[in-house]
Structure formats: structure tokens, C-alpha cells
Amino acid sequence: MQMAITTRRVGAISIVKYTCDWEHLDPALQMQELAAETWNRILNTLEDDGFWYDNPKFSVHAPPGTDLDKFLRQARAHQKLWLQHVAQVFGSSGSKRLARGTPQPQRELIFTGVLRIDDRRYDPRGWPDVRAPRCEAD
């Protein structure tokens, strides 16, 4: 079970860092265990309002009324820290290969993280800070 090791605040935004001890995870079940831990944290906060981002190593939360751009900057920063950690453990190509071989629901729980804003979950490619590509007129 993951343990919170640090909690800090950036204004109204709360950031919790969890242990992610690869040595104590069963190698055959590592990815499933990470997905389950993340999913359990999400289930425990489903009734809570506000903005949430969760991955296996971090939870980022902001109460309703918080500036969405500030929250998204923190969520992206902690997504990047998590992905860098995964790349250190498995190597850059190894982590990409693992992500490609993981079904979408688990991939989101393990790799990209889960973003929820006011009870709505966002697809990793559709976060509010991601602009749609421009279409050229014919």
C-alpha cells in the first residue's frame, strides 16, 4: 500500500507525494498494482468537489473557485515528474513500450494520470490546457 510521504501547498492547491517503491512490487503485477493504488485514491475522492489530478506518485487537488490555469500548471508539472520517474526506472524506450502495451483505462491510471474537474474526467489528449490542432481551410 502506498503511503503519503509529503504534503505541500501552492496557494490553495494541495500536492501529496506518495511512495512508489518498485522493489516491493511484484514484478509480474507492478502495473496492475500501480493502477489499483491510483484507482483506490480516486474512489476515495469521488464525492469531493473541485479539481483533481492523480497518478501513482502524486495527487494534486484544488478546491472549487481555484484558478484553473494555476491548477493545470501544477497537474502538468506533476505528470511530467511522474513520467520522468517511470523513464528512469524502465528507460525511455522501455516505458514507451510498456505504455503502448497497456490497455487504455490502465494506461491512464499508470502513465498519464487522471484529470477530473468538477466531476468530469478528461481524456489525456483533451485536457482544457491542450489546444486542438488548427485545421487548414481547403
Image: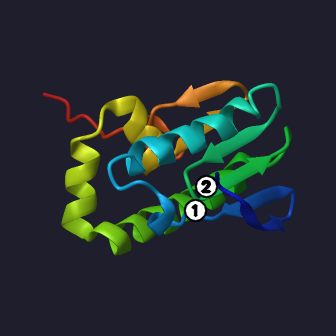
Q: Looking at the rendering, which quadrant does residue 63 occupy?
A: top right
Comparing 60 with 118, the one in front is: 60
Q: Where 132 falls versus 89 (above or below)?
A: above
Amino acid at circle 2:
Ala
Give the spatial CA distance, label 2 vs label 1.
5 Å
Q: Is residue 108 left or right of residue 6?
A: left
Where in the figure is residue 38, as x and y percent of width and height? Answer: 58, 43
Residue 46 in which image quadrant: top right
Q: What x and y, as percent, mark residue 116?
A: 64, 34
Closer-to-camera residue (69/115): 115
Write down the residue under mark 2.
Answer: 75
Image quadrant occupied by the C terminus: top left
In the figure, is residue 86 to the left or right of 3? Answer: left
Mark 2, other Cα within 10 Å: few <14 / some 14–19 / many ≥20: many
Q: Find numbered disc 1 in the image and state the secondary structure of the residue it sits on.
A: helix
Few, some or many C-alpha atoms within 10 Å of disc 1 (few <14, some 14-19, many ≥20)?
many
> Which residue is drawn at the image coordinates 62% and 65% (left, top)?
19
Where's residue 55, x and y in %? 55, 50
Whether residues under marks 2 and 1 lie with C-beta atoms below 8 angstroms apart, the answer is yes
110 over 88 or under it: above or below: above
**Element type where label 2 sits in the image:** helix
Q: Which residue is mark 1?
A: 78
- The residue located at (22%, 62%) in the rendering is 94
